[in-house]
Image: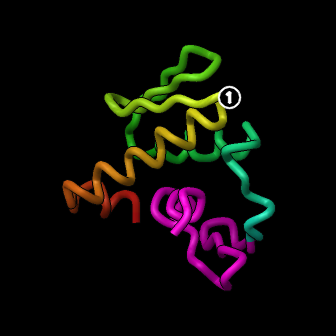
């Protein structure tokens, strides 16, 4: 599973509909993988930020290439890469820790 696919499914709650698209039940939309590129598009990355804030994460940034969601940090060449990397770090961290409380919120 790619970084983007993990974020789409585990944080945004989108379901894999076909090998190349997800379905967003909340908005009743199909999202093709080429239409969601958070590492390259700041608007797409901000969708992740908004969702994590709904889960209680506090978003902070240096404005250029580093972000944090509470104590989880991410960096990248661009702000959108940093957001994506930090969000993926949340997924990795909680997959290892197997925190059921968070996964109930993220699922």
| Residue 18: quadrant of the picture | bottom right
* Left or right of residue 24: residue 73: left
- In this view, the residue in front, 82 or 12, is 82
Please, is residue 64 above or below residue 85 in the view? above
Please, is residue 102 above or below residue 48 in the view? below
Residue 7 drawn at (x, y percent): 52, 57
Q: How many marks?
A: 1
* Left or right of residue 79: residue 60: left
Please, is residue 33 above or below residue 57 in the view? below
* Left or right of residue 67: residue 94: left
Which residue is found at the position 44% from the left and 27% from the top?
Answer: 68
Farthest-out residue, front: 77
Which residue is found at the position 66% from the left and 74% from the top?
Answer: 22
Q: Residues within 10 Å of mark 1 (few under 14, many from 20)?
A: some
* Left or right of residue 98: residue 85: right
Question: Residue 20 colored magenta?
Answer: yes
Residue 4 drawn at (x, y percent): 59, 58
Instruction: Check disc 1 and report the residue beneath it.
Output: 78
| Residue 73: quadrant of the picture | top left
Residue 47 drawn at (x, y percent): 64, 46
Residue 37 drawn at (x, y percent): 72, 52
Please, is residue 55 above or below residue 68 in the view? below
Farthest-out residue, right: 35
For the C terminus, the quadrant is: bottom left
Q: Give the range drawn in magenta.
A: 1-30
Farthest-out residue, bottom: 18
Which residue is found at the position 62% from the left and 37% from the top?
Answer: 81
Say how the picture is coloured.
Answer: rainbow
Secondary structure under tag 1 reads: loop
Which residue is found at the position 50% from the left and 26% from the top?
Answer: 67
Question: Residue 9 colored magenta?
Answer: yes
């Amino acid at each position: 599973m790619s970084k983007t696919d993990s974020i789409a499914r585990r944080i945004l709650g989108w379901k894999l509909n076909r090998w190349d698209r997800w379905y967003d039940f909340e908005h009743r939309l199909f999202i093709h993988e080429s239409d969601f590129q958070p590492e390259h598009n700041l608007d797409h990355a901000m969708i992740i930020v908004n969702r994590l804030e709904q889960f209680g994460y506090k978003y902070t940034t240096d404005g250029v290439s580093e972000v944090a969601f509470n104590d989880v940090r991410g960096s990248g060449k661009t702000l959108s890469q940093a957001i994506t990397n930090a969000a993926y770090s949340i997924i990795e961290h909680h997959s290892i820790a197997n925190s059921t409380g968070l996964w109930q919120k993220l699922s």
